[in-house]
Image (tube, grey):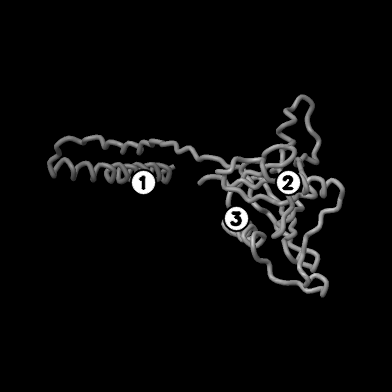
Amino acid sequence: MANTTVVSRPGQVKSDTVAVTFDAVVDEQHTFTNQVTDHPVEKGANISDHDRPDPDKVSFHAFFSNTPLSTTQTTKAVKSGGFTFQTSALQAAGAIGAVDGYARSQWDKLKQMRDDGTLVTVVSTLGNYDSMVIESITVPRNAKTYDGLECTIGFKKIVVVSNALTRTVTRSPQASKKKSAGNQTPKDAAEKDVDPLRKVVGGIKSANKTLSGLGGL
């Protein structure tokens, strides 16, 4: 599956790249954290075993507009802190209408990517982030953003690994071989069975003789 590229402003990717392009990004947040052990570490130990990086995170506070400014105008407006939407008369009445037009199409793309867990490449002012998924989307709706869409969208890196299959061959334990007793006649087998009994009877007779001898003392 090809990655969908989400960019922070127009002109950062080739036109043939599948992209969701914000009309303006007024804030970026880049988060890099590590999981560090709370336990003492033995001197000389590999510190990397006790300090593991968490997946990278980046978020945009961005706008989609149905009446966008040019790239140059947007850059100047964002730098001056004067970015606003051109809205209809419904803004004056304090009404909040449905999102339509270009802003709606971009919202539908983001929502679908979030629902499908699509892997994306995020292009930011600090560089590109590969293998990202949308972790959260926050959309405030008010009269000031009537003709567009304001959102805060958070991305989190997914660590993609490949499983390696290993074939293991095990041998079944060999069955113990029975020692052959040779060809036996019924007589031989009977004598073999009687022989232990003869030993027991002989032992009893010997014990009786001993007791008899003691009785004569």
x and y percent of residue 13 in the render? Answer: 63, 41
Residue type at tag 1: Asn
- Dot 2: few (<14), some (14–19), or many (≥20) neighbours within 10 Å? some
Residue lying furthest top: 44
Disc 1 is placed on an element classified as helix
Q: Residue at x 68, y 54 (%)?
A: 135
163, 79: nearer the viewer: 79
Disc 3 is placed on an element classified as helix
Dot 3 or dot 2, earlier in sequence: 2
Mark 2 — residue? Answer: 71
Residue type at tag 2: Thr
Mark 3 — residue? Answer: 113
Which mark's residue is nearer the viewer, 1 or 3?
A: 3
Mark 1 — residue? Answer: 208
Which quarter of the rendering shows the C terminus? top left
x and y percent of residue 122 in the render? Answer: 66, 44
Q: Residue at x 69, y 49 (%)?
A: 155
- Residue 207 appears left or right of 160: left
Q: Residue at x 82, y 46 (%)?
A: 76
Q: Residue at x 75, y 59 (%)?
A: 150
- Dot 1: few (<14), some (14–19), or many (≥20) neighbours within 10 Å? few
- Mark carried by residue 39: none
x and y percent of residue 5 in the render? Answer: 61, 45
Please tell me how many numbered marks the rendered image carries.
3
- Dot 3: few (<14), some (14–19), or many (≥20) neighbours within 10 Å? some
**Whole-number angstrom distance, CA of label 3 to CA of label 2:** 25 Å
112, 142: nearer the viewer: 142
> Is disc 3 in contact with disc 2, using a CB cutoff of under 8 Å?
no
